[in-house]
Image: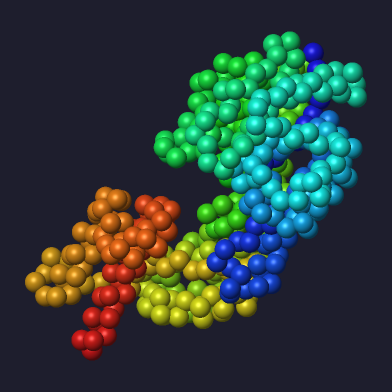
Amino acid sequence: MSDFKFIHCADLHLGSRFAGIRSRDRDLAKRMAESTFSSFSKIADLARSENADFMVISGDVFDKENITPRTRFRFAEILGGLDIPCFIAWGNHDHTTSWEDDIPLPTNVHEFGGEPERFMLELKNGDRVEISGISFTSRNTNEDLAIKLEGSRDVFTVGCVHCDVDSSDASAYAPARLVDMIEKDIDYWALGHIHKRAVLHERPYVVYPGNTQGKSIKESGEKGAYVVKVVSDTVKELRFVPTQEIIWETIEADITGRDFRSFIDSVSSMIEKNSVVRIAVKGRGALDKMIRSEPDEILKAIQERSAGTVADIEVLSKPESMPSAGGKDLVSKVASVADSVMMMERDRLIGAICSTATSKKYLQKHFESMSDEELRNLVGDAKVRLLERFSEASE
């Protein structure tokens, strides 16, 4: 019966560039690139302050295969500063990396290979724990890696793998089935790949810690690592500790009944320090037209009064009055067509947007990556802008 404590993290994505920000704000882009290293440094500090016995990293340490020497060196330096064993199961982003021979990882690091391995760790208190793991050997694999791992009935076993559990996506990376995993002699599944933390099962525990630093507004909220405390071969504590440098958040701002000053003051007061926010503008009012026509100016006005950073503005509001659908005039017909487009099924809607050969080749993947709500909002925004142009023309 073993007593010990370990750190579980994944998806560090060291060296991420945070696409879409650099061109507009170079200082923010620099902060973001540094934030992934800062978060992992905090995780290393956490391991020390918690007196952890070991650490497991479940894949996607790096953001891409061709990393810079500096990125690998900094990772090796952080690991080398720990006096505990560290176990890495490589993922789809780092199944192979640059400078492996020139900048080897320190001796306290064990890298799992493409075949399942079982490592029996002797702890300082004389207890034992088994770490079973396997790594990606290619970027795209539809092979179930988790099913290959085995554990021991008489020793607490941690299974370390980068995989996609019970995914409905036919192109999922290393797809695995929860029902198969919980039948194994593995007491804690330390998973990676999904950027949102989740406990899929308890006893045995099947855990995604999420990524350590959000990369975009879609990865909002706190990010970090789990501290796992095991007493008498039973998980007694599973504690999430946030370590992110920057928090992405979406703030909803209602324009109903507001003038420019009250809107700016209200939104600015909601933005916290060290946060990067998207402002989702909702409601109905006269400010709708101003925000749609001058979003960058509105953004700057909010930014000047804010402690955090405004990444962008999502306009979901409506003007004070909208032409109704169903009439016989041209504007009503346009409103009716727009409403019918918004009600299309997802695939048909994307097909309507990408109807040319050029758009299918260069733009379709972008629209396919959008959620249903984002697609509907896109059509809604086009509807409002088009009707505004008709209104201006009539005036």
Horizontal placement of 234 versus 313: left or right? right
Q: What residue is at 68 percent from the left and 28 percent from the top?
A: 133
Q: Nearer the viewer, residue 139 or 391?
A: 139
Q: Is residue 185 positioned above or below 336 on the image?
A: above
Q: Position of residue 135 (x, y in %)?
A: 65, 34
Q: Residue at x 83, y 30 (%)?
A: 53
Image quadrant holding the C terminus, namely bottom left
Q: Nearer the viewer, residue 22 or 359?
A: 359
* Residue 41 vertical position relative to residue 203 in the rendered view, above or below: below
Q: Is residue 124 visible?
A: yes
Write the residue at 77% across / 56% down: 69
Which residue occupies the foreground of this view, 213 or 50? 213
Give above or below for 327 relative to 96: below
Residue 259: % across, % down: 45, 78
Left or right: where does residue 380 sit relative to residue 29?
left
Q: Quadrant of residue 90?
A: top right
Would residue 56 be seen by someone viewing this image from the given angle?
Answer: no
Residue at the front extreme, as displayed: 101
Q: Is residue 90 left or right of residue 168?
A: right
